[in-house]
Each structure stands twice: as structure tokens, then as C-alpha cells.
Image: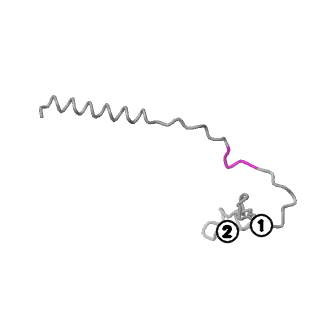
Amino acid sequence: MTSRLRGVRWLLTASVLTLATFSGRAELPEEPTTGPETVLRLQAPYPASWAMVHNFSFAALIDSSFGLVDTSTGHFKGMISAGQFATL
């Protein structure tokens, strides 16, 4: 293969790969703007089937938390930060 033919082949391959890369982008819908600061109010008084579960870790006491769980359905309702062995 001549040097000129190799150069043309390389240019053609690079062009095809570049076009394939940029033409394959998906148009994704915008995600809702909710983040860790999202706060929801729950019904009060809580049903008897809801439980607060203390998820503490001796390896990282500052990162402990409470989870709110509905024991009748098994659904996780939310989380409350509880660093340094917080109590309710």
C-alpha cells in the first residue's frame, strides 16, 4: 500500500469515527431539580407501622443516620442525619 493511500485511508477512518461519535448523542429530558436539601412533610401523628431505625457506624460516627421505614409495606420513607450518636 502506498503512503498516499494509507494517509487517505487513515483520514477516512478518522472522519467516520468522528461523525459516529458526535451523531450518536442522545437528547435526554431534563432531570427534576431536587437534591439532598429536599424536605417533605409527613403526616402526623405517624402510623404505628412506621419505625425509626438508627443506622450508626463505629467506624464513622459523624455519618450515622436514622431511617424512617414503614414496617407494614417495607418501604423506605426517608433519612435524617444523626451524627455523633444522636438520639430521638
Report crowding for label 2: few under 14, some 14 to 19, many 20 or more residues within 10 A (C-alpha): some
- Is 16 displayed left or right of 70 in the figure? left
Observer-nearest of 43 and 83: 43
Quarter holding the N terminus is top left
Q: Quadrant of residue 18?
A: top left
Find residue 83 and report its image quarter: bottom right
Q: CA distance from mark 1 to mark 2?
A: 15 Å
Residue 40, percent across and down? Answer: 77, 50
**Residue 51: mark in rendering:** 1
Magenta region, main secondary structure = loop
Q: In which quadrant is the C terminus drawn? A: bottom right
Q: Which residues are magenta?
A: 34-39
Foreground residue among 41 and 65:
41
Disc nearer the start of the sequence (1/2): 1
- Is residue 36 magenta-colored? yes
Tag 2 residue: 56
Residue 37 colored in magenta in the image: yes
Q: Residue at x 65, y 62 (%)?
A: 63
Q: Amino acid at mark 2?
A: Phe
Q: Give the percent coordinates (x, y) of residue 41.
A: 81, 51
Dot 1 crowding, Cα within 10 Å, few <14, some 14–19, many 20+: some
Left or right: residue 18 versus residue 41 is left
User: Against 66, is 24 above or below?
Assistant: above
Q: Position of residue 42 (x, y in %)?
A: 81, 54
**Could you tell me which residue is drawn at 70 percent across and 63 percent down?**
65
Q: Say which residue appears at 75% left-offset and 67% top-offset.
A: 71
Q: Is residue 69 left or right of residue 12?
A: right
Q: Residue furthest bottom?
A: 58
